[in-house]
Image (spheres, grey):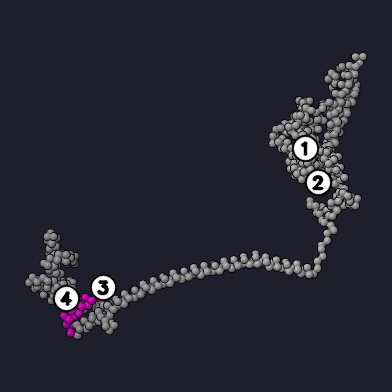
Amino acid sequence: MINFEEELKKFHPSLEVEDAEEAIYNQDLTDMADLLVKIVKESGEQESAE
Amino acid sequence: MFCYQCGCQLSEHDFCTACGADVSLYKKIMFVSNRFYNDGLEKAGVRDLSGAVNSLRQSLKFNKNHIEARNLLGLVYFEMGEAVAALSEWVISKNLRPEKNIADDYINMIQANASRLDSINQTIKKYNQAYAYCIQDSKDLAIIQLKKVLSLNPKFVQAHQLLALLYMDGEQWERARRELRKCMEIDRNNTLTLRYLKEVEQMLAPDEGAKKQPARRKSEETLRYQSDNEVIIQPLNVKEPKSSSMSTLVNIGIGLLIGLAAMYFLIVPSRVAGIRSEKDQEVRELGEQLDAKTLEIQDLGSQVDSLQAELEEKKQELEGYAGTDGTLSSMDNLLAAAADYLETEDVDATAQKLETIAGNVVLEETSESFQKLYNTLLGIIGPGLAKDYYDEGYRLYYETDYEAALEQFTKAVFYDAENVNALYYLGNTYRRLEDYDNAAAVYDELIERFPGTDRARESQKFKNEMEAAQ
C-alpha cells in the first residue's frame, strides 16, 4: 500500500533556470581518476619523506 | 587515452612510455567509465532513461572528462523534462572541451529561442508550486497546477509521477494508471513508475478483488469498469424502494395537477395573447375597409352634387328653349314664319318673326336643320327687304336723321350682307354720329370683304381722316 506522505518525500523541487549557475558551481566534479592521482601523489610524498 | 601525469598518449603498456608512471589502475578506471557510458547509451536507445541516467552518472564518477557521457546525460535529462539539469551538464561539458563540442549546439538551440527558455522556466516554477501545494496538503490545487505543467511540457516525468501519486491518494486509479502509462512512454524502466503502476494494477484487477478488500474500502459499494475513455461507476446494493398502489395513484394525481398548473400558467396565457393579437388584426383590417368605403361614399356624394348642379343647369337651359306647351318656342316661331310666308308671301310679317327669332337665340348654337331653314328663309326674303331698308335709310341719311338711318342701314346689312352700299352708309352714319369705333369696324369689314372697289377706297379715306382727327 502506497503511503502518500512517504512517497512525497521522494520528490523534490526541480531546479529553476536562475539556480543553474549556482548548481554548476556547487557540483562536485571529483572523479575516480582525481582520487587515483591524489593517492599516487600522496604515496610518493610519503616515500620521499621516509 | 592520455597519461594523468605528463599528458602523453598512452600505449598498450601499463606504464607511460614518456614519464614512466604506472597507469594500469588509471587505465582500468577509464575502461570502467567507458563501460558505464556504453551501458547508458544502450539504455537510452531503448528509452530506459532513468537506467541511462544512473549508468552515465557512474561513468562520469569514474571519468569526469568523458564528454560524450556528459552530453548524453544532458540529452536524457532534457528528454525527461529536466531542462535545467540538462543545461548544467552541457555547460560543464563545454567548459571541459570548448572546441568541437556538440553541447555548444544544444545550448545555442535553447538560448536562441527566448520564448522557449521562458516557457521551460515557467513550467518548472509551476511544478515547484504544485509540489508546495502537496506539502501544504492542497491536493486539488496541486492537481490543477500539475495539469497546467503537463500541458506545457508533456515529457516532464516527475510531474506525471506526482500527479499519478495524487490520483492514487484520491483513489482515482484509472487516472493514475493513465498518467503512469504516459510516464512509461517516456521512461520505460523507471522504478518509481513501475512500483506505482503495480499498485494501481492491483487495485484495478477485478479477479483479485477479494484479496484487496482493505484497499478498496471506498469503492466496494460501486462497480467500476472502463468504456472507451470513460470510467463507468455503477452503485451496488442500491434497491428501489417499493411503493404501494395508493402512493402510485397519489403520485399520478400530483403529476396531473402539476401538468395542469403548468398548462394554465404557461400555455393558456400565450394562447390568449395569440387570439387577442388575431382579433386586433381583424379589427384593424375592418377599420381600414371602413375608411376606404367612407372615402368612396364621399367621392360618390360629390359626384352626385356636381351631376345635380349640371342637371339643374340643363333644365334651366331647356326651359329657355321650351314654350308653355313644352315644345321649343324658337323652332315653333321659325316654322310659323316659314308657313306664313308660303301661304301669304307677306315679307314684312316673316321678317318680323325672323327678327324675333334672331333676338331670342344664338344662331350658332341651334341645330343644323334650324340654321338651314332659317338661312333659306332669310335668303328668300332678305334681298328685297334689304333694298327697302336701304332706300329708307338713304332718304333719312340725307335728311340728316342719322339715328333713324342707322336702324335702317343695320337691318339692310342684316338681311343682305352682300349689299356693299348698305355697309358703306352704315359706316358713314356711325361716323356722322361720331361713333368712330363702330365706324372704323364697319369700314374695316368693307375693305376686307370688297377690296379694290370705290367704296373700299372711300372707306379707307374716311378711316384715315378719323384717325387723323383723333
Q: Give the alpha-carbon distance from disc 1 to disc 4, as whole Å.
A: 145 Å
Who's the residue at 83% across and 53% down the image? B224
The circle drawn on residue B364 is: 3
Q: Secondary structure at mark 3?
A: helix
Nearest to viewer (mark 2 / mark 4): 2
Answer left or right for B463 relative to B68. Answer: left
Q: Earlier in the sequence, mark 3 or mark 4?
A: 3
Q: Give the alpha-carbon distance from disc 1 to disc 3, as whole Å.
A: 125 Å
Residue B396 percent coordinates (x, y): 9, 73
Which chain's residue wears label 4?
B
The circle drawn on residue B383 is: 4
Who's the residue at 16% across and 80% down the image? B348
Q: Secondary structure at mark 1?
A: loop
Same chain check for tags 3 and 2: yes
Same chain check for tags 3 and 4: yes
Same chain check for tags 2 and 4: yes
Q: Earlier in the sequence, mark 3 or mark 2?
A: 2
Q: Secondary structure at mark 4?
A: helix
Residue B113 percent coordinates (x, y): 70, 34
Nearest to viewer (mark 3 / mark 4): 3
Same chain check for tags 1 and 3: yes
Is A18 rendered above or below residue B319? above
Q: Give the alpha-carbon distance from disc 1 to disc 2, as whole Å.
A: 21 Å
Answer left or right for A19 relative to B277. Answer: right
**What amino acid type is highlighted by mark number 2?**
Tyr
Q: In the rendered image, which quarter is residue B64 located in?
A: top right
Who's the residue at 84% across and 18% down the image? B6
**Which residue ends up furthest to the bottom in the rendered image?**
B343
Residue A16 percent coordinates (x, y): 75, 34
**What amino acid type is highlighted by mark number 1?**
Gly
